[in-house]
Image: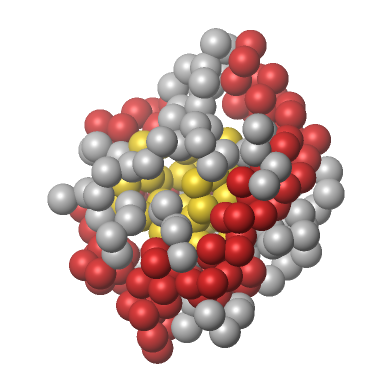
Amino acid sequence: MINPLPDLNKIAIAPSILSANFASLGQDVAAAERGGADLIHVDVMDGHFVPNITIGPQVVKDIKQIAKKPLDVHLMISNPDQYIKAFIDAGAAMVSVHIEAVPHLSRTLTLIQSLGAKAGVVLNPSTPAGSLEEVASTLDFVLVMSVNPGFGGQVFIPHSLDKINKVKKVLSNAGVKAPIEIDGGIDETNIQKVVTAGANIIVAGNAIFGKSDPESSTLALRKAALAQKI
C-alpha cells in the first residue's frame, strides 16, 4: 500500500537518501521523518544516463517497508520505461523521468499514471523550460535540477531560480497547477530563495544526512523554508 501523498502545493521537504548512510539507512530515514520530512526522495542512477550507480527496485522495496512517508523516485537512467513498473510495484508514489531519456515523453507519463503513481518531468540545468510545453497538461509535477545530476554534495546553480519562474510561466500558460520540485545544493542558506521563486517540493541530501543529526537538520530546513512562505 502506498502511503498517501501530502498536499504538494504547500511546502514539502524531501530528504534525499543519496547522502544517507546506507549501513544505517532505516535509522536515517526514521530520523528525517521525525524531523518533519514529507517525502523520501530516492535517486536512481544507472552509470549510463549519469556517471554514477546507486540503487534498484529491491532497495526501494526495502525502504518502503520502513518509511512512513511516500517515496519520491527520481529515475536518472536510460530507457526508464523498462523499469517504471518495477519501481512502482516496489512502492514509488511519485516517479520522475528526464526528457532526454525517453523518446515518447507523453506516453511515459501516461504509463506512470496508469500504474497508480504521480508522473514528473525532470529538467537538467541546460534543458529549457519550454521543453515542457507539449506535455504540460499531462504531467503531475516538474523537477528542476539545480545541479548537474549524478552526485550529491554539489553547489547550487544560481540561474535555477530563473528556471523556476520560467517553469511557472509554462505551466500557467497551459492552465496547469502542478507543484515544482527542486533538487541540488539546497541548504539553509538558499532554501528561502527557492521557496520565494515558487518551488513547492524541496529535495535536500547533504544538508540533512551530511549532518550528525538528520532529525534536527530536517527540522531546521523546514523552519528556514517556511520562514519565507507567505
Among the 4 quarters of the image, the one containing residue 31: bottom left
**Image quadrant where one finds the C terminus:** top right
Q: Position of residue 48 (x, y in %)?
A: 55, 63
Q: Residue at x 65, y 20 (%)?
A: 170
Query: Compared with residue 43, is residue 108 higher up or lower down, i.e. above or below?
Result: above
Give 82 or 206, whichever is nearer the viewer. 206
Q: Residue at x 52, y 21 (%)?
A: 177
Q: Position of residue 36 (x, y in %)?
A: 45, 59
Among the 4 quarters of the image, the one containing residue 111: top left
Q: Residue at x 62, y 72 (%)?
A: 206
Query: Compared with residue 139, is residue 23 higher up or lower down, i.e. above or below?
Result: below
Horizontal relation, residue 158 to residue 53: left or right:
right
Query: Compared with residue 7, is residue 41 higher up or lower down, i.e. above or below?
Result: below
Q: Position of residue 142 (x, y in %)?
A: 55, 36
Q: Residue at x 51, y 53 (%)?
A: 13
Residue 47 visible in the shown view? no
Q: Position of residue 8 (x, y in %)?
A: 45, 37
Horizontal relation, residue 81 to residue 174: left or right:
left
Give 144 or 13, whichever is nearer the viewer. 13
Residue 198 visible in the shown view? yes
